[in-house]
Amino acid sequence: MTLFGHSADPHIAERVNIAIADFLHSNGLPSSLAEDDKFTKLISLSRLLPKKYVLPNRKKVGGKLLDAIYQESFDSSMKTLLSESKIYGVSVFGDGATIAKIPLINVLGASPNNSFALLDIIDCTSEMASGGEKTV
């Protein structure tokens, strides 16, 4: 049996299922990830890739691609946060956190269309080093 000039593997679905299960278990990921909408989208899009496609390396994933995901998420968050701000306004609030001994202040915003938007994270290391408090 051939499909577009290539041999069709009658067991391909089973092989892909095994590969997915092996990937999830080998990396300590939850098995529920197999039902995640983003994972389903990944599998659907991968069917459209050309044979010469090359997976992105870790530097690209942790660099340019991560930056693009962050920017898209931030833009979307700001759009919903500000969508009716002229009518209802925006509440700005924050909290302190210490992560790996780094003192931080999280600046958050809320509005009717976005109950939690991360606006900024302030590193208070220099303030604390000079004997101050997380008051920035």
Image (spheres, rainbow, N blue to C red):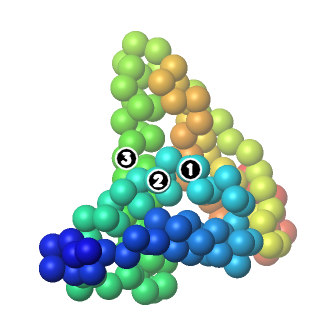
User: Of tags 2 and 3, which is closer to the observer?
Assistant: 2
- The foreground one among 54 and 136 is 54
State which mark lies toward you, 1 or 3: 1
User: What residue does disc 3 label?
Assistant: 75
Which secondary structure lies at badge 2?
helix
Of the image marks 2 and 3, the number of the one nearer the N terminus? 2
Amino acid under disc 1: Asp
At which x and y percent is residue 88?
Answer: 46, 15
The front one of 29 and 89 is 29
CA distance separating discs 2 and 3: 24 Å
Going by the image, does 10 lie left or right of 7? right
- Left or right: residue 40 versus residue 95 is left
- Secondary structure beneath dot 3 equals helix
Pinpoint residue 14: horizontal percent, then vertical percent. Answer: 53, 68
Give the total number of marks visible in the rendering. 3
Image height of 5 relative to 24, above or below: below
Going by the numbered disc 3, the residue's amino acid type is Asp
Relative to 58, 49 lies left or right: left
Name, please, the residue furthest toward the front: 1
Image quadrant occupied by the N terminus: bottom left
Q: Which residue corresponds to the image point at 43% horizontal and 86% vertical from the top-left? A: 57
Image spot of residue 108 (x, y percent)? 60, 41
Q: Are marks 2 and 1 in contact (CB under 8 Å)?
A: yes
Q: Earlier in the sequence, mark 1 or mark 3?
A: 1
Q: Which residue is mark 1?
A: 36
Q: Tell me the quarter of the picture where residue 70 sits.
A: bottom left
Q: Residue at x 48, y 77 (%)?
A: 62
Cα separation, mark 1 vs mark 3, equals 23 Å
Residue 40 bears which disc, if any? 2
Inspect this view and state whether residue 124 appears.
no
Q: Is residue 6 above or below residue 76?
A: below
